[in-house]
Amino acid sequence: MRKIFIVAPIVFLVFISCSEKKNQSAAAGGPPKAAPLQVEALVLAPSAISEKLEVTGNILPFESTEIKPEISGRVVFLNIKEGALASKGQLLVKLFDGDLQAQLKRLQVQLEIADKTEERQKELLKIGGISQQDYDLSVLQLNNIRADIELIRVNISKTEIRAPYSGKLGLKNISPGAYISPSNILTTISQVNQLKIEFSIPEKYSSQIRNGMEVDFTVEGSPGEYKAAVSATESSVEQNTRNLKIRAIVKGGDRYLVPGNFAKVEIILGRNPNAIMIPSQAIIPVARGKQVVTLKNGQVSFNNIVTGVRDSSRVQVLDGLSLGDTLITTGLLFIRPDSKLKLTKIQ
């Protein structure tokens, strides 16, 4: 029984001691508060940007034509020098026209006789030697012969195949003595002293394209950059691709620009001197969009944003931020709506 009475006072003293320590801890203000999260920030300022569109295109000659005959015949003269320049109207191919020349001579003889007959009957008509109907028939015959002669001359001209304009000849597909028809392609001619470029853009940009608009492009193997001016657009958007086809006239040129070349086209669609550009790493992807964190009067705010164009490190914000806002750029994974922040660096 004495042991029990001795232990009880000891337990009572320990309980009193613990209570005093708790009271002292409460009097000191409780456990220490968490330190503010140290982050970096960016004060949003206006940036000048240009919206660029990059597409692919093809270099084309200003004009390109397949040379074909209008009539069938045998080649008696061939003047197609592959890869050479031909001037407008230059004779390239001559077909046999002996039969047509013979018909022309026969008609010319008939024309002389008909002309003299018309003159005699005209004099007879004056003195009443023939009727007006007889005279009209002689005039009709004279005019028919003249029309036949004109038709023969047109057919003879078709035996001469000439260059429609000055340009560079392609490869020839025939040889002297060959019999050709309108289905044969004799060669091609291209106007290469002036070039065009053809490319397509998505339909959403079609309203921003206008005639005379300047575009830049490069070609494989050339160290330089070239310019072209938009000359025309297709009348409608292609249904399958939803693209609008555009043609532009190349300004200048050199040996690197060859028709058929593949080109990389860059189009400046618009310039904005007051754009809001933010670092890519400041954007937080969320289920239905994108967010950023801002700080105003010491309070954290999560803002939903709409983005536009981007470059290698920045993204344009179209909605959700204003110039002068303080954007948090680091520590985004640890920030909560009630977080206390300490700015260590402000740009």
Image (spheres, rainbow, N blue to C red):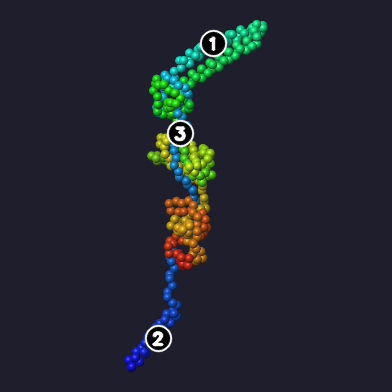
| Disc 1 residue type (three-letter) | Gln
Is the Cβ of the residue at disc 1 closer than 8 Å to that at disc 3?
no
| Residue that appears at 47% across and 43% down | 241
| Residue that appears at 48% across and 27% down | 165
| Residue that appears at 53% across and 39% down | 235
Is the Cβ of the residue at disc 3 closer than 8 Å to that at disc 2?
no
Q: Is residue 333 above or below residue 128?
A: below
Q: Which residue is mark 2?
A: 16
Q: Which residue is mark 1?
A: 110
* Cα–Cα gap, marks 3 and 2: 103 Å
Q: Nearer the viewer, residue 64 or 123?
A: 123
Residue 60: x and y in percent read 45, 35
| Residue that appears at 48% across and 67% down | 338
Neighbours of disc 1 within 10 Å: few (<14), some (14-19), many (20+): some
Marker disc for residue 61: 3
Q: Is residue 51 above or below residue 176?
A: below
Task: Say which label, 2 or 1, has the lower sequence index.
Answer: 2
Q: Is residue 29 above or below residue 342?
A: below
- Answer whether residue 344 is visible to the viewer in this image: no
Task: Say which label, 1 or 3, has the lower sequence index.
Answer: 3
Judged by depth in the image, the label closer to the viewer, 3 or 2, is 2
